[in-house]
């Protein structure tokens, strides 16, 4: 049953999702693991929001930035489901049968967000491959008119996943989300083919990251430029991080859908789902200098940045050096201090 069917049926569930009366009163509180998901979810969203705002305000409209903007929407939505909502429900001990409609809607949004995140991450990997190899076979996807269709296709895929496929449903006993609501009916009734296909595609996209890392490390070789070396290093690290969490989460959830899984594997799947979204903002803050500096400029006043020596951009750096030069030569006029400390072609600044 899909969210569209629920909405068109006056919010009534089909027989497959009708809970027995006694199950609606059963609670299984998991306060420790629930608190972890709630606290880390809120923190990750707070860390992500400045980066997301920077991407929105950026004048750069390259395909990669448009994909990062779309990824931000899906990631924040996913964190609200796989972290914040998961934490609250786990602390309460509530499962699908305690709040059927509420959990059903959350699960539909979580399902769509996961599908959207995976699609965007695969395209970001392709975009990186195109940047280092203009003759990459999928380069046509980023041509101006074709790319508009790509973005529309991702949005259409999200709508289809949310409204027209079976959602994932929360189970407090395992602190995780399953397609089967555990009502004692045949699990195959709840199978979601789109989810399985998507996760297999995520797994199949791993060679894109391997190709990217190989091309950067071996094809480009060693560079005497420290900037190029660090840029290559950061791209490789980002590729490994993105690939690891999405691939592991995809593998685990495909396995869980078809085979009996121990509790530790189920919890690991939930954690990798959470960090497949959370690792993006951490990568922005640690590996993407442009977004990090823009976020600091947005959040901290100039006085605060000067106090802690956070000089963002060449203008602030030059001003700080001039001030340092003036203070270090107290007996010389400001003009002479500037001329002593600043290169001649900068003296007129």
Image (cartoon, grey):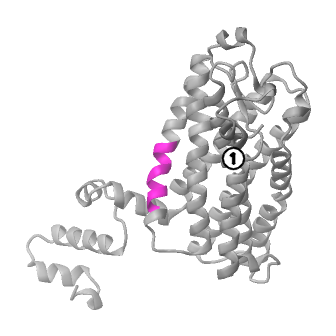
Taking the spot 64% from the left edge, 36% from the top edge, the residue there is: 105
Q: Residues within 10 Å of mark 1 (few under 14, many from 20)?
A: many
Taking the spot 57% from the left edge, 19% from the top edge, the residue there is: 91
In terms of secondary structure, what is the magenta stretch mainly? Answer: helix
Residue 50 shown in magenta? yes
Q: Is residue 331 visible?
A: yes
Q: Is residue 240 visible?
A: no
**In this view of the protein, which residue sits in the foreground, 82 or 310?**
82
Quarter where residue 228 is shown: bottom right
**In this view of the protein, which residue sits in the foreground, 72 or 285?**
72
Whether 348 is drawn above or below 48: the answer is: below
Quadrant (top left/top right/bottom left/bottom right) for the C terminus: bottom left
Instruction: Write down the residue under mark 1.
Output: 162
Quadrant (top left/top right/bottom left/bottom right) for the N terminus: top right
Taking the spot 59% from the left edge, 35% from the top edge, the residue there is: 83
Residue 166 shown in magenta? no
**In this view of the protein, which residue sits in the foreground, 83 or 223?**
83
Quarter where residue 179 is shown: top right
> Would you say 71 lies left or right of 150 here?
left
Q: Which residues are magenta?
A: 45-54
Q: Where in the figure is residue 2, as x and y percent of width and height?
A: 74, 40
Q: Determine the secondary structure under disc 1.
A: helix
Q: Residue furthest bottom?
A: 345
Taking the spot 61% from the left edge, 51% from the top edge, the residue there is: 74
> Would you say 295 lies left or right of 268 here?
left
């Amino acid at each position: 049953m899909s969210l569209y069917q629920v909405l068109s049926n006056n919010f009534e569930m089909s027989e497959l999702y009708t809970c027995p009366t006694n199950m609606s009163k059963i609670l299984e509180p998991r306060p420790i693991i629930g608190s972890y998901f709630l606290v880390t979810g809120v923190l990750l969203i707070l860390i992500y929001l400045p980066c997301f705002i920077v991407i929105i305000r950026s004048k750069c409209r390259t395909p990669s930035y448009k994909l990062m903007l779309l990824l931000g929407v899906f990631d924040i939505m996913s964190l609200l489901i796989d972290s914040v909502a998961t934490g609250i429900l786990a602390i309460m001990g509530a499962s699908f049968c305690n709040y059927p409609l509420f959990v059903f809607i959350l699960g539909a949004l979580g399902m769509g967000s996961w599908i959207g995140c995976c699609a965007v991450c695969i395209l970001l990997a392709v975009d990186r491959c195109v940047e280092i190899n203009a003759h990459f076979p999928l380069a046509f996807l980023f041509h101006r008119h074709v790319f508009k269709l790509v973005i529309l296709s991702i949005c259409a895929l999200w709508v289809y996943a949310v409204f027209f496929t079976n959602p994932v449903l929360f189970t407090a006993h395992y602190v995780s989300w399953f397609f089967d609501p555990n009502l004692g009916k045949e699990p195959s009734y709840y199978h979601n083919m789109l989810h399985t296909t998507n996760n297999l595609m995520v797994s199949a996209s791993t060679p894109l990251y391997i190709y990217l890392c190989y091309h950067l490390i071996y094809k480009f070789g060693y560079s005497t430029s420290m900037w190029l070396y660090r840029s290559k290093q950061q791209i490789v690290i980002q590729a490994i991080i993105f690939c690891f969490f999405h691939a592991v989460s995809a593998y685990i959830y495909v396995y869980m859908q078809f085979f009996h899984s121990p509790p530790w594997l189920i919890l690991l799947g939930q954690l990798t789902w959470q960090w497949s979204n959370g690792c993006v903002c951490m990568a922005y803050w640690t590996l993407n200098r442009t977004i990090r500096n823009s976020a600091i400029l947005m959040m901290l006043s100039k006085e605060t940045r000067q106090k802690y020596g956070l000089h963002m951009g060449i203008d602030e750096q030059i001003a700080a050096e001039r001030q340092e030069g003036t203070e270090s030569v107290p007996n010389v006029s400001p003009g002479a201090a500037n001329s002593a400390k600043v290169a001649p072609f900068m003296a007129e600044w």
